[in-house]
Image (tube, coloured by chain):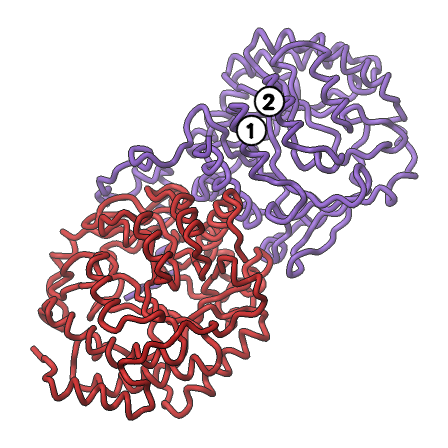
Chain colours: A purple, B red
Amino acid sequence: MTSPITRRKMMQAMGAATLAPSVVARGAMPRPQVPAARAAGWCPEGPDTPKLSLFTPPHADAAAMRRLKQIGINHVHTGGPPIPWKEDQIRSLMASFQAGGLTLGNIMIGGFPNTIYGRPGRDEEIDKVRQSIRAAGRAGLPVIEYNFYVHRLTEGYFATTGRAGAGMTGFDYKRAKDLPPLPEEGAHNNEEVWGNITYFLKAVIPVAEESGVRLALHPNDPPAPLSRGSQQIMGTVEGWKHLIEIVPSKSNGITFDCGVTREMGEDPVEVCRYFGSRDRINHMHFRNVRVEVPYEEYTEVFLDEGQNNMFAVMKELVRQKYPRLIDPEHPRGLDVDRDLSTAPPQYAGGGEYVGFVYNVAYVRAMLQAALISQ
Amino acid sequence: MYKPNRRECLQGVLATMAAGAAPAISRALPRPQAGKTASSENDKIKLCLVWGAQYPYLVKLAKQIGVTHSIAGSGLYGVPRSQYVDTLAKIKAQYDAAGLTIAGVESHPVEVEKIKLGLPGRDEELENYVAAIKALAEVGIPMICYDFCGGIGWYRTNKDLPWRGGCSSMDFDLQVANKEGLTKWGRISAEQMWSNIEYFQKAVMPVAEKAGVQMALHPDDPPVPELRGIARICTSAANYRRILNIVPGPMNGVTFELSVFTLMGEDINALAAEWAREKKIHFIHARNLRGTRDHFTETFQDDGQIDFGKVFQTLHDNGWHGPLRPDHDPILEGEGEEAKLFHYPSTPGYGVLGKMCGIMYIKGILASRHIPYV
């Protein structure tokens, strides 16, 4: 009875889909008149519920976007151009994703090292960030994400293996704790960096508020106690809490990462409630981890095998009515991704598309289950 | 049209008995199922994939994504009866070596076309069937998923329907099917099919009861009363109850195919509760859809009209924890590239990445409801 889909047929389908990315538009086949899932009282996802999102490069081609649509991804986040951003740049980024049926919900901004280190030149950088926020606001981008690391201690990461040899990302502070400061970064204590970020936030948050844009500060990950001689302001929940008090505005929020929360030995449900109830979660990373020593020794594992109760986290996000992006990031290293990849993974022991297939299907089930459990 | 007479029927039963089958009145007690190991595993739903031991790359993928149970093909087509046990023992050893537990076989272990259509030669097929059941029991394979779709197996009018993001799904439209005309078997009445299934059940079930092999009847898919001139009878819960009472016993049960029972217009939650309590559900196929019996489209598990969580909860609440597998899933466009590694003949409904979407969605739903699975 079965007729195998031949490679040729697949290619034909792919070619046709390239010409007309919309499924409905493809071919002259009559569409079945079927009730929408929503009409049947099921599929509780909607415009005000959390949205699964994957990082997608700014110039993703049509095929790459279709691969996301197929696994049920309708939202993406990406990296931004050099600052200052122009409104038409942001509009064109949003439009290129929209052409693939994807809504761009967050762009990462960077390129302001003098601001982080409190060096001369920071005022020019901050001005460019303000211009970028205004451009994003005019283009209708809701969230801008940023980092404020003195140094990211990726030197402590190592590849390890888990279930049936799948790649896991380990972190061991001992591998990196004695590394000296890099000359271009220097060593900075928290007092200094809090001063620098306060200077930054006081300048940019009012602009973000006016522009209708929310900023999301990514935590320090790994949250090691010292990172090449520098303390990490976003390496404790206490730090996260302090951040949102510097400028009391919904535009001054965090990227809530339940994996990093556990890496610090904290309870992600409680932390989610704290920031969610204050409406300061402006972006979200959904991943699991197995911790040996908080802050120092842990392994990033599959979503279904770590110490976090992922469904409890999802339920808390839904209970707090979090409506923005959820990124099931850091896929584990499945053989198929490793065998197909021509470059090393972004993180030691990490994976790619097939790992994301795994994550997205699992997290979508949890999202739907959480929404109907309300 | 061929119809078996009373004498042939009797011959069939006698042949079965001569072949060592239990008397038809046997009421075997439920026996511990073969192939089960740790008692804790018995209380968990067994998630299965159909990637057999002959596909080592996929076996490893299954284990990396945390799936250790498998539904095997029995491989007895064309094998002389005297070699059934040896053949199955080899298959079983292959799976053991691969670290996969065979939860059952799908579909019929031997040829059945004459049995289904009541044609001359069916008694030999039945003798093969009986021997196959005994051989399966001997090597410790506990379940057969079988169907009684005469002449036509599962059937779709379009097996390459463009779906979400340009992937390939399937669709059935009775109006289109009706235009395809009769098959080479001509017209076969419901009465004839009832007679055929009775003949089959009376010959086979006593053997299955004695051997302790679960017989899990898959519904006719699609469950229309007639397809291209051939009547279909496994098309409603009422008909199922009648079939299960031909030779009632604990081994005589159901493959609870969520989407087909939905298409029948049954209340699948009520049915799940009833049959789980009666221990009639030996196997579950989880698949989603949109539409109605006469015109429907297969969807991803996450965007159809069946609320899987609700059904799984009902099953769990009624003590069910048998084998379950994602059934048809759309074929993802990117499979062309990955397939080079898989060495697996992806056919409609059976793409590797689509199957991953299915199994991970099911895992996410089960985890969200704290329903134990392995």
Question: Who comes first in sequence, dot 2 or dot 1?
Answer: 2
Instruction: Identify the mark at residue A317; answer none if there is no mark.
Output: 1
Residue B276 visible in image? yes
Chain ID, mark 1 = A
Q: Residues within 10 Å of mark 2 (few under 14, many from 20)?
A: many
Q: How far across and how far down the image is residue B317, in percent?
A: 43, 49
**Mark on residue A276?**
2
**In 3D space, how far apart are the residues under numbered discs 2 and 1 (Cα atoms)?**
7 Å
* Above/below status of B286 relative to A242: below
Residue A132: horizontal and vertical position, in percent? 62, 15
Q: Measuring 76% from the left and 12% from the top, which residue is drawn there?
A: A198
Image coordinates for residue B85, horizontal then vertical, percent: 44, 86
- The vertical placement of B355 against B76, above or below, is above
Instruction: Answer few, some or many: residues within 10 Å of disc 1's Cα (few below 14, many 20 plus, some between 14 and 19).
Output: many
Residue drawn at x 43%, y 34% is A372
Question: Taking A4 as reference, is B123 left or right?
Answer: left
Mark 2: which secondary structure?
helix
Can residue A14 be seen in the rendering of this structure? Answer: no
- Type of the residue with mark 1: Leu
Asked if the residue at tag 1 contacts the one at tag 2, i.e. Cβ–Cβ closer than 8 Å, the answer is yes
Q: Quadrant of the N terminus of chain A?
A: bottom left
Q: Secondary structure at mark 1?
A: helix
What is the chain letter for disc 2? A
Where on the picture, by quarter, is residue A265? top right
Kind of residue indicated by mark 2: Gly
Residue nearest the viewer, comparing B158 with A281:
A281
Which of the 4 quarters of the picture holds residue A17?
top left
Q: Which residue appears at 37% of the width and 82% of the height?
A: B132
How many numbered marks does the figure carry?
A: 2
Q: Is residue A282 left or right of residue B35?
A: right
